[in-house]
Image (tube, coloured by chain):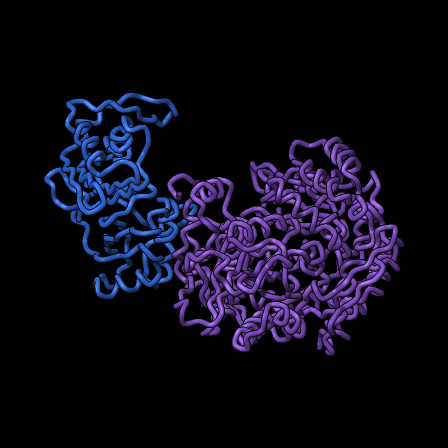
Chain colours: A purple, B blue
Amino acid sequence: MLRAVQKPGRYVGGERGAVHKDKNAVKLRFAFCFPDVYEVGMSHLGMKILYAVQNAEPDVWCERAFAPWFDMREQMLQYNAPLCALESGDPLRAFDVVGFTLQYEMSYTNLLYMLDLGGVPLLSKERGEEDPIVVAGGPCVCNPEPMADFVDLFLLGEGEQMNVELCRFLIRAKEQGWDRAKTLREAAGIEGVYVPALYTVKYNKDGTIASVTPKRGAPMPVRRRIVADMDAAPFPQQIPVPMIETVHDRASVEVLRGCVRGCRFCQAGFIYRPFRAKRAETIDRQARELCRSTGFEELSLLSLSTSDHPEIEPLLDRVLDWTESGKVSLSLPSLRIDSFSDELVEKISRVRKSGLTFAPEAGTQRLRDVINKNIDEEEILRGCRTAFEGGYTVVKLYFMMGLPTETDEDVAGIAALAQKIVDLYYSLPTKPKGKSVSVSISCACFIPKPFTPFQFAAQDTKEEFDRKQKLLRESVKSRKISVSWHDASTSFIEAALARGDRRLGKVILEVYRSGGIFDSWDEGFSLNRWLAAFRKCRRDPAFYANRARSFEEINPWDMFDYGVDKQFLIREYRRATEEQLTTPKCSEHCSGCGIVKFTGRKCFD
Amino acid sequence: MTDLRLHFSKTFAARYISHLDLMRTMTRAIRQSGLKAWYTEGFNSHLYLTFALPLSLGFESLCETCDIRLLEEESCDPAEVIPRINAGLPFGIEVFNCGEARFKPGEIAYARYICELADAEFSCGKIQDAACALLAKSEIPAQKKTKKGGMRTLDLKPLIHSYKVYVEGENCYIDLTVSAASDNALNPNLVLDQIFEPLGRMPDHILVKRTQILTRDMKNFE
């Protein structure tokens, strides 16, 4: 089979750092599945952490599986070969647990695809005593409802402790000889575990949710899990080192979790609260160990906003101290433009000068205030000036289109801001000699997400997005500025799934049955296939994507407690429409989001 | 600085690691070994590595080489170097020897491949007959892709130094020694394609293993 496919290295395993155990000597076998290709899944830090955490249990063997690309699928179907985990080469159906991480909604069909290829019945209710328990975690499960038909239990929140507790629980359940129904019922007692079969949802005539009722003492709301102490949280010293090039082919260390900012569109900024930074010392030690054990040539310090680390400069000094001599290049994704100081430029430029990426998100000050971005134009231009003076000539800017209250003026403002940056470059006497500037605008379509203040907002229609994208293209006058944008039809489906309810399970199944896989790829996505499936199941994607929701409406995710109050989200939504900022940083002023009540302790000393 | 030639094998699943990925893998293995090796000094400084004769994707090999440069202070003792590098290599890639480079890559003239073949439908005898019939010809014209994307006809016969065809157990084996000079190397896949053309398709099982890299005087490339 492997002779006939592109990049066979995706399918062979055998990487150094992969964990092999004797399958007859362990009590629980866990197949950790990433519903995308190997190169994407192997770039994901969370999977590596949980792989290490679960394998640290001597009687648990956690293996990996990824979605085979189209060419490999053809081969597997031809030879009737099931999808197997990389370590043991055993099919998914042979495992006790098949676990997925749901990082983006467009990977939902791939969960079905992997189960199907792995020989596991797709519907939870069709699985028997011999079938694996199918579990799923990751950011998307803050609204897991569209996947409720396929997943036996969801793991809400951070997995470092919860996954181990689940494994230990399932070993006990096996030893007790519990059947599947009892096992799932009892599992609902683990904090963070949500078993969808234990809840009944009723609907109003207008299609909105009337009530959600737990059965058999299942918890309501279901609380998400968090790790209290990031310095004590397990972090792998060794990880499987891929042999083929992955998307993020480098050692990654998480520097902090949560975010102090509160940008109103950003789901990650709310569902990962509270803000918890690792100490510089911890990060430095973990990064050094990981680089040593893997031999990676590049190190990335990851977080939602790395420059918000309270010890960012001492941290960089510490890390640069050994990365430079060890020929490791350092990358810092997610830098805020207002943190881009001369000192920071000097430090990161010592390694390698590539392009810089900033995210102003909106083109005008009015709209940046609506989203609580807390960056003004002066700061953007100052950040760019610092970059240009530091020798950078390529700047990439991220924007979002279709944000609540957006007008044509805001769209044109994106082009105007890019033009100001180009003009700034040419006005600088200190600009790099003989070099031209390049400003690229990357424009995503705004998608309202659960647990954000904008969860109540309607998404723009595809027609509106198309019109605005055309307007933006026409507003750009300089050839130094390039514009790229996301496909509005993918964003439309993503929006429907993000705020969908459990009735969408039928749609997802229908899309899969009619050939839909790899929906996050141009090679896989088909708007027509999705629309046909929605029609066939008598559901309207616009009901989920393009409808503004009242504050009183019961949302499918209202039954989950992620620590952020709905009242806070309502307050924030109102402030947004009034163009009011809330707080530059919650470390300076608490905005009262509810997380303190949730954790029972202050976020900052 | 000391030039050191690593001799390694590439077998099992590792045969699906491409040449580019092999370079990345070897770089990381040497980096994690902690051995102080030389980096190039250009704009994009990288660890200096030279592979004498790239191996086709899907082939196994018992005789690959990779040259590195160690800084003065490093020991070149194989007993120390080999385990440190192997600790960083994936399953299927294993350094089994290292030492001074006796020959330059330009001195490579031949490579020996053993092709293991089997098929559910074609018997070993049938495969053997097809192989012998082809290899006995005085001319073996074949179509070869040129770098520009076109096709040209090439006579494989002068590129085949020697061969032996035999059946053992369930498999038919073709032991082929072919030209591997940099300007005139023959990929054994081209020979296999010609052998199976009259049979209409390739066999189910093909495993090509490179067993020797040789100089013009038929000395092992060391």
Q: Quadrant of residue A79?
A: top left
Is A233 in front, or is A355? A233
Quadrant housing residue A199:
bottom right
Image quarter of the C terminus of chain A: bottom right
Q: Which residue is at the far left? A: B217
Q: Is residue A250 visible?
A: yes
Q: In the displayed structure, would residue B100 be above or below residue B144?
A: below
A417 lies left or right of A126: right
Q: Is residue A77 left or right of residue A149?
A: left
Q: Is residue A296 visible?
A: no
Residue at the (78%, 33%) spot, across then down: A467
Q: Seen in the image, is B43 located left or right of residue A506?
A: left
> Is A86 drawn above or below residue A564 in the view shown?
above
Question: Measured from the top left, where is residue B125 in percent x and y?
Answer: 19, 36
Residue placed at 67% from the left, 40% from the top? A486
Q: In the rendered image of this protein, does residue B208 appear above or below residue A88?
A: above
In x, y percent, where is residue B102?
16, 48
Q: Residue at x 20, y 27 (%)?
A: B134
Percent x, y of residue B20 = 38, 45
Residue A539 picture location, percent across and down: 77, 45
Q: Nearer the viewer, residue A532 or A459?
A: A532
Q: Nearer the viewer, residue A175 or A528?
A: A175
Q: Quadrant of the N terminus of chain A?
A: top left
Report the label total. Answer: 0
- Frontmost residue, B144 versus A67: A67
